[in-house]
Image (cartoon, helix red, strand yellow):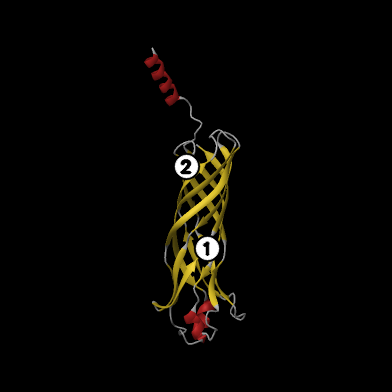
Amino acid sequence: MKTLFTSAALTAALFAPSVLADFHLNVGAINVSPNDDSSYLNVVETVAGLPQNSSKLAVDSNTQLGLTIDYDLSQNWTLELVAATPFSHDINLDSSVGAVNGLAVGETKHLPPTLLAQYHFGSADQTFRPFVGLGLNYTLFFSEKVDPALTNVLVATGAAQASDDVSLHLDDSMGLAAQAGFNYRINANWGVHAMLAWADIDTDAEVRVNGTNVQSIDVKIDPMIFFLAARYSF
């Protein structure tokens, strides 16, 4: 009788409706705000007659449509995949020389797919659930373009000819990502998702003239990422 009762209890537990929704879709606005730093543009400084160690690169922020997919492994553990429409960033000169400070260098686009393991505090039936997460980010840079302002400076200083092909290249990046946030449940299906994250994004940038690298720059982007979204649980 005891064995029969135990089997029945296990069967009921397996087939009882779960408070877990296996998949969740979060869609909203995601902002990437770089905490940027770079090595100095020593070659450009030399040909432009600027003081040494006076000029770096700065990357501006951008907001796009963000999408994350959450899969619940258990009541407390979740895998999250972060995606977004391509971010577009202007790259400018950050210089102590006022005449060239803010000079447009170029622009780039990037996609930052990120996979994180999240720990959710509390139980699955709670209305408000904070979480923390840790994972890996891969950043794919593409559609890099040099701004005509930089080309004009290179031509004016003799570093390039007007007919030369001046281009910009950024290497892809892989690094750690960390996040904290919360989910707020409105009803069985709908809720709100909010997240603050940081990603370790470092890249090697090259200014090329006719395919030949004339200036290499180590760029640390390391952005803060803000995401506010509507949440749908399946």
User: Looking at this view, is 9 or 108 the one in front?
Assistant: 9
Residue found at x 42% / y 66%: 171
Quadrant of the drawing holding the N terminus: top left
Q: Earlier in the sequence, mark 2 or mark 1?
A: 2
Which residue sits furthest front? 2
Residue labelled with disc 1? 88
- Residue 38, position as x, y percentages in the image: 50, 71
Mark 2 neighbour density, 10 Å: few (under 14) some (14–19) many (20 or more): some
- Residue 164, position as x, y percentages in the image: 43, 81
Eyeballing the image, is 45 above or below 82? below
Amino acid type indicated by mark 1: Ser
Tell me the element at label 1: strand
Residue found at x 45% / y 66%: 203
User: Looking at this view, is 143 or 182 the one in front?
Assistant: 182
Residue found at x 56% / y 47%: 181
- Looking at the rendered image, the disc whose residue lies closer to the viewer, 2 or 1, is 2
- The picture quadrant where one finds residue 142 is bottom left
Amino acid type indicated by mark 2: Thr
Eyeballing the image, is 55 above or below 225? below
Tell me the element at label 2: strand
Residue labelled with disc 2? 78
